[in-house]
Image (spheres, rainbow, N blue to C red):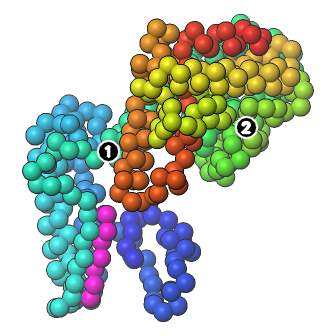
Amino acid sequence: MIMSRTTSISYSIRYFPIIRRHIFAAAIPGSFYGRLFPSRSIHVAYSCYALHWLSVAPKGLIDMKNKRRIHYDGASIDVWNAYFDQFEKDMGVFLSARANEMVHGGLIVVILPALPSEQYYKIGYKLFTFLESSLIDMVNERNVADNAKLMVREAIIENLDIQTKTFVIVDMGCSVGPNTFFAMQNVVQAIKHKYHSTCSQIEFHVFFNDHVTNDFNVLFESLFSDHQKTYFAAAIPGSFYGRLFPSRSIHVAYSCYALQWLSRVPKGLIDKKNKGRIHYDGASIDVWNAYVDQFEKDMEVFLSARANEMVHGGLIVLVLPSIPSEQHSKIGYRIFTFVESSLIDMVNEGFYYPSELNFSSFLTPLALDADVAPCVKLNT
């Protein structure tokens, strides 16, 4: 088997099927856009859904022509031609290398995605559009955390009123990093700045919270390999829609881009009102109201749990996406539109039966500005 140098070879070999007893197997790291084997040594070469990945970015694209894009979907004919030229070059290199490696009478099997000739670049590949949107959203989330840094610092200086030598901080909805590390470091630095003149020997205990399915091993591996240990760390698996800590034990609770995820499917949506949908975008006002009602219930549960866990004088910092009140459901969250479309395509192409897909498992509304403030005031 051939894999790039970044592929986990041990993982691939570990999960090699039982039939390995009947064959000999080896891993060949390296790019198939070049020679990998001695001359006349391969009888059958097979490649499935791999050759559409180019060896380099098409020449001339690292400029304003395709800025913030990872694909040619919807781009100009110049961008399409740049991708096509690079594909031709790569295919030539691939076939030339295999021509030297194959024995006479051998066979090359190549499977790759393609479009009907008459449709060329006008038809995009939804997967890449979705991936592009996701990457941009990840950049935006980091920007949100960076932009919130000053506000968090000011909030801690003005509102945190605690005298202790050990501060307990929790990030609720931490995922696996790295944004959580930057956020927690910002909180630690702000507290140090506030108390530097009154207490120079402050210790910090940071708890990273997310669902039990979160890969905390990856989280801590990244934490201790990329950051100096400026605080003690622990994982708290479980839903933040409920108690997670003893009473009066948390000094600072932080949550960024997590509270928009609902705890459950909004009541009444598991019917024809939103059939085959994973979001409220473009749906009726009844569907929108169902999401809002569930959001309000979840926010109340969240804040009630934190009210018991926070020490007096502590601070809760919440960062979550929202939309202007007057626009409500008319503005959708584009990433969910792409996910929904991709799931439906997979059903239509036979990858899944309709009954196998739970379209209600993507549970996130974009709250209105007017919906968030009352929830907070009601529970403070």
What mark, if any, has residue 126 been given in the picture?
1
> Does the magenta stretch mainly form a helix, a strand or a loop?
strand
- Asked whether residue 46 is drawn in magenta, I would say yes
Q: CA distance from mark 2 to mark 1?
A: 32 Å
- Residue 242, image x, y percentages: 79, 32
- Residue 356, image x, y percentages: 53, 55
Q: Amino acid at mark 1?
A: Lys
Q: Secondary structure at mark 2?
A: loop
- Residue 328, image x, y percentages: 48, 15
Snapshot quadrant of residue 70:
top left
Residue nearest the viewer, comparing 327 with 235: 327
- Residue 10, image x, y percentages: 54, 71
Mark 2 = which residue?
A: 239
Residue nearest the viewer, comparing 226 with 210: 210
The quarter of the picture where the C terminus appears is top right
Drawn side of residue 124 relative to residue 289, left or right: left
Q: Does 100 sit above or below residue 143?
A: below
Residue for point 20% across, 36% down:
74
Q: Which residues are magenta?
A: 43-50
Q: Amino acid at mark 2?
A: Ser
Q: Secondary structure at mark 1?
A: helix
Residue for point 47% across, 52% down:
354
Marks 2 and 1, the one that precedes in the sequence? 1
Residue for point 81% across, 25% down:
305
The quarter of the picture where the N terminus appears is bottom left
Snapshot quadrant of residue 100:
bottom left
Residue for point 14% across, 60% down:
89
